[in-house]
Image (spheres, coloured by chain):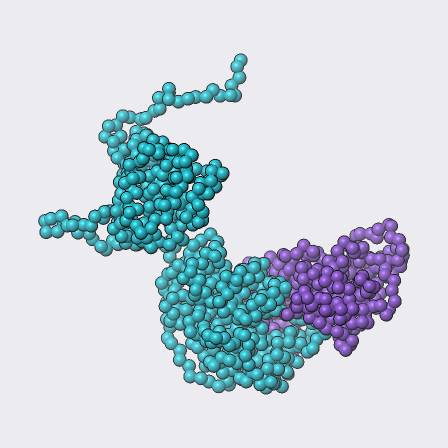
Chain colours: A cyan, B purple
Amino acid sequence: MTTKLSVRRRGTILERVRNGEDGILAIGNHPAVIQSILDLDFLSGKRTPSILGIITGNRKAYKCFFGTREIMIPCFKDLEHVPPHARTRVRWMLNLQSGRRAFDSTMRFFEAFPQALGGHIFAENVPEAHAAELIRRFSGKLIAGPSGVGILVPGHLKLGAIGGIDASQLEAGKLKTPGTIAVVSTSGGMTNELIRAVAASGHRVSFSVCIGGDRFPVTPLSDVLALAQTDPQTEALVYFGELGGSDEYEIAELLEKKRFTKPVVAYVAGIIDEAFDEHMQFGHAKALVRSHDESARAKRDALVKAGAVSPATFPEFLQAIAWLPRAAVRDTVADINALMNRTPSILSTREVVDQSEIPVFVRAGKLARRSENAFAASALKALLGRDVSPITAAYAEGVFELLMDHGGAVSGAVNTMVTARAGKDMVSSLAAGLLTVGPRFGGAVNDAARAWLSGVASGKDASDFVETRARESSLIPGIGHRKYRVGVPDPRVAALAQFATLLKKHPHYDFARAVEVATTAKNGQLILNVDGTIAALFLDILAECEKYSRAELEELVDVEFFNALFIIPRSVGFIAHFIEQKLHDEGLFRLPEELLFVRPSGKKKKK
Amino acid sequence: MARVKISEYRAKRIILGDLYRGLELHEDVKLPRALKGEWVAKVDQGVKKRFKQGLVAIGSRAKLASALAAWKKKGFSRFIVEPFVPHKENEERYLSLERVRDGVRVLHAKAGGVDVEAHPEAVETFIVREQADIKKLAHGMKLPETFLADLLEAFNANFLAFLELNPLIVRKNAAFPLDAAALVDSTGAFFTRAWSESDIVEAKPTSPAEARVKALDATTPASLKLSVLNQNGSIFLLLSAGGGSIVIADQAELAGAGKLIGNYGEYSGGPTREETYLYAKEVIGLLLRSKAKRKALVIAGPVANFTDVKRTFLGIIDALSEAAVPLRQAKVKVFVRRGGPNEAEGLALMREFLTREKLLGAVSGSEAVITKAIDEAISFIRV
């Protein structure tokens, strides 16, 4: 028997999973479930986690264990932000959102990842109409739920809470060992109970799907049976069902028509219903015309008649599982204790400087030759977490030199000096100066970087860019100078601009220059200034010499990397002003009265 | 996902919109003064076979008023009043809609008032999968196309799961549903304004304990369910998981002890300690109020996937602690079987508590069969 689900060009879904197509994107976070998936990955001997990312707001990473080592799982605020390298590996959706949001996010997931093989919708309370629409659209996928605990392919895929969440449960259910028994159930708790029963009887599970207890599971029982029939690993099926619905008649029909030919051991719960006068407690509101008797007894009888083993009691059912033909079992040894006793760290950071590496300054009585721009190079290595090329280091060195000080009149220097004069120490005075850095003082490099990035990314013409800004009456950072103008160029800008000749292309710098053409046409003072030049060329250098992608550059802007280019050298300048004040101590500073303009208070009334 | 019944009044408002001239009357609302001509009054509480039970009245205002007064005396509190549509019996038809896996199943019979279950041969069946099907269906069943299209649209847009119009009168392009019964998908409440919680009618009055659990269930992502089966039962069930709880209850029935069961219910989906405490308190309360001589409490469930055994057991112990003295006085024994996350710690806490309070029947974990605790409780009761 073949259906869309079971046979595909690249093998059945199960074969593809066993061949490593296991990439999961989680929508919403359920820490225990996510951790259990990583634990099974680790116990199964995978080198990399199957979870590629989590769609969730307000964070960029979620810290988990992979074995006993901590790792950061990337988080994205929406599907569009999943980067290309993860995107190509996504095969499975783990939807952990509430019933109110699950439909919408599932639709968007399969639109964004048409190559995905399936998923699991964890939520209960997904409306019937939503489930019906998902069925209409995604019948070719393997989607467990709404509700239930998901899909398991031992040793290869754990999509959901299925099989338990702590490592001792994963071990008790032998979830890392592929086997020969397919476990299928509507109920989440009973899925796990059956997985345990299969393991305890010396068998192992080939795959398991918890269909979920909702009226309209996206992937119905018949499709899961087709999967079991075509799966060469599966030798028998263990099934748990309940009163209500007519799924069991489908199994019976498939057995009778010899379209399902493997042994079936089934338990249909709900005999208790016969003890009550009415069907209130279990019976759903069913169709008025029923083609079949939906009682547990009738469904069990139908299964038995079709050739399944369907005992009356649960202990007999367990016995029947134990009697299923056994295959050789090869369990690998796993150290569960190590996974059970892990203490997560409370903060995460990175080794900024390699402290084990001791530099050599003097060798054999002579100065050891150190590379040029060594400080700039090591500062960038600390900031960016990678070695940088000579051009990048030389550029940073130049920037540091240009931005070291800009005289005593600027806001930050004034604050440093005033604080020093008030008798405060170096750190306080430096802090006073640094605390001034922001949108109007010193922050222009980062802001300019943001402007050039968005300008180039938008693909807009520079004059349109200027026009848009003008209409919003917002200033363009990196443009404009008090002293220099067209005809009187800033020599520092000219010096920096030489770096452009070292690059193959420099789109941000070109864009900044094009903006300058548009702005100077209006006002000769609106030239590209030092801040704007630094930002533009640094973007181009990072892109070309350090292979930064646009997204990575955006991230650098978001974390204010470009402000560091100002703060590092200017700290030297502020300290110099501090030392100067302390060396020539003039006592407490007070602004001369005549320099203050004092407006009369409007509230005072003349008598 | 549950299908619940809404009032006939609300169902008709949804399908007929502002054209509907019927009125909804609650216990304290009187009939309008200006009610001219012939009207129909019915009890609107999801009761079946109203006509046979005398819960339908037809006639003038005075006649309806006296019928309403009589129904109120019987304890009914919700009524529908609408204009009477004079018609011949042979005009009556049957029409129902139900959401099924692949669309909306429409059943139609030319004779109304029909008991479809007894006369499947009189019923035509059709499944509407897409818009284009409506035209075919209208033609085939000789129903006005606009009526059918509007009906399906209202059905789909407002999360209806089942709608029965029986009898339905069709005259040219107009259709008059005389009686309507509708089930809505309760999970749709968030997405529609056409109906709300207050339109849901319940034929069976719930006990205070059931009502409290229902209220609790509505405020948590976990699942908490409780039905009282026999208030003087001997065995009370504090079960977890939807499927596993049925297996355990089945075992009682298979052992011929179905009638000893006092309640059915389950908690699942990872409730907090506090939620489990509140739920357990209700079950323990039912057990204490039962007049049975010998009583047992069964705390059982399958091996949970993610519901924390320790956390939920702490909640149960909180509830048992409060009632330890009366439980001991009633010589109640507690039988436990459960597995899942933090199983060892949860079981140890439970065993220690039950031993200290002299309530211990037996405690077992995932190594034991799921039905062990119920078997033990039945043997204890039958001694």
Q: Position of residue B350 (x, y in %)?
A: 51, 67
From this viewpoint, which residue is outermost toward the left?
Answer: A365
Q: Quadrant of residue A241?
A: bottom right
Above or below, A550 relative to A270:
above
Would residue A91 be seen by someone viewing this image from the given angle?
yes
Q: Residue at the location (39% across, 45% down)? A: A511
Q: Is residue A83 left or right of residue B233?
A: left
Q: Position of residue A385 (x, y in %)?
A: 31, 53
Q: Is residue B314 left or right of residue A302?
A: left
Q: Position of residue A97 (x, y in %)?
A: 53, 60
Q: Is residue A339 left or right of residue B177?
A: left
Where, quadrant-wise, is the N terminus of chain A in this rendering? bottom right
Q: Residue at the location (66% across, 56% down)? A: B192
Q: Residue at the location (32% across, 30% down)? A: A409
Towards the viewer: A298 or B72: A298
| Total marks placed | 0
Towards the viewer: A169 or A392: A392
Q: Position of residue A209 (x, y in %)?
A: 52, 73
From this viewpoint, which residue is outermost toward the top?
Answer: A607
Would residue A349 be seen by someone viewing this image from the given angle?
no
Q: Residue at the location (75% across, 67% down)? A: B138
Q: Is residue A195 left or right of residue A429?
A: right
